[in-house]
Image (tube, rainbow, N blue to C red):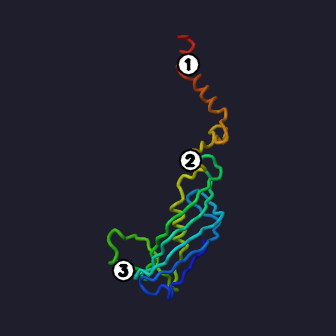
Amino acid sequence: MQPILIPIDERLEGAGAALPVSGHIDEAGYSLGEHEFRLPNGIDYDLVLTNAGEGILASGMVRAHVVGTCDRCLEDAEFDIASEVDEYFLFEEPAEEDLADDEDEVDFSLVSDDNTVDLSESIMAAILMETPFVVLCRDDCKGLCPTCGANLNEGDCECAAKRAEQAAKESPFAKLRDLGL
């Protein structure tokens, strides 16, 4: 993703000052694990940057329409994402003694040397956090037949009936049917 640099200038000079920032990113897609996702309409964001004294707080919403591949039937799966951004950009890196014991590996961002903040990582992190781990075209997706590969959402194949018939023939109790009891 291209950087989204916002200058920290006189509009955010004093503590409590706020600057609304909104826009559109023409991002084609992203990946998460082994999944590839397309963003046909890009990403829209609507954020507010607030001077919180020791840094800049970026908060707001990002929205995107996402197209991926269904994990069960391999057809397109579409969903909408509306996620919150909540990122704190410090003016200076905190001293080691200012961090609590449980904050040894705290992830924080800094206002850059040229007095800007890059919102691209925060926006993409918000998109990733709302992307489902299991991607489905619909909640009741039946998937593919493990034998012939037919899409079971489009109709049943003969494989399940054949497997049931074969299992009945191979059952150790199959001979009991012939007794006529």
Work out whether 79 lies above or below 155: below
Q: Position of residue 120 (x, y in %)?
A: 55, 73
Give residue 95's mark: 3
Instruction: Write down the residue under mark 2.
Output: 139
Residue drawn at x 52%, y 60% is: 130
Instruction: Write down the residue under mark 1.
Output: 174
Work out whether 159 lies above or below 85: above
Foreground: disc 1 or disc 2: 2
Closer to the camera, 181 or 97?
Answer: 181
* Residue placed furthest toward the bottom: 10
Circle 3 residues within 10 Å: few <14, some 14–19, many ≥20: few
Q: Earlier in the sequence, mark 1 or mark 2?
A: 2
Secondary structure at numbered mark 1: helix
Residue drawn at x 43%, y 87% is: 14
Work out whether 19 lies above or below 34: below
Question: What is the distance, in whole Å, between disc 1 and disc 2 at their CAs?
Answer: 38 Å
Question: What is the distance, in whole Å, between disc 1 and disc 3 at their CAs?
Answer: 77 Å
Answer left or right for 69 relative to 99: right
* Residue placed furthest toward the top: 180
The image quarter in which residue 79 lies: bottom right
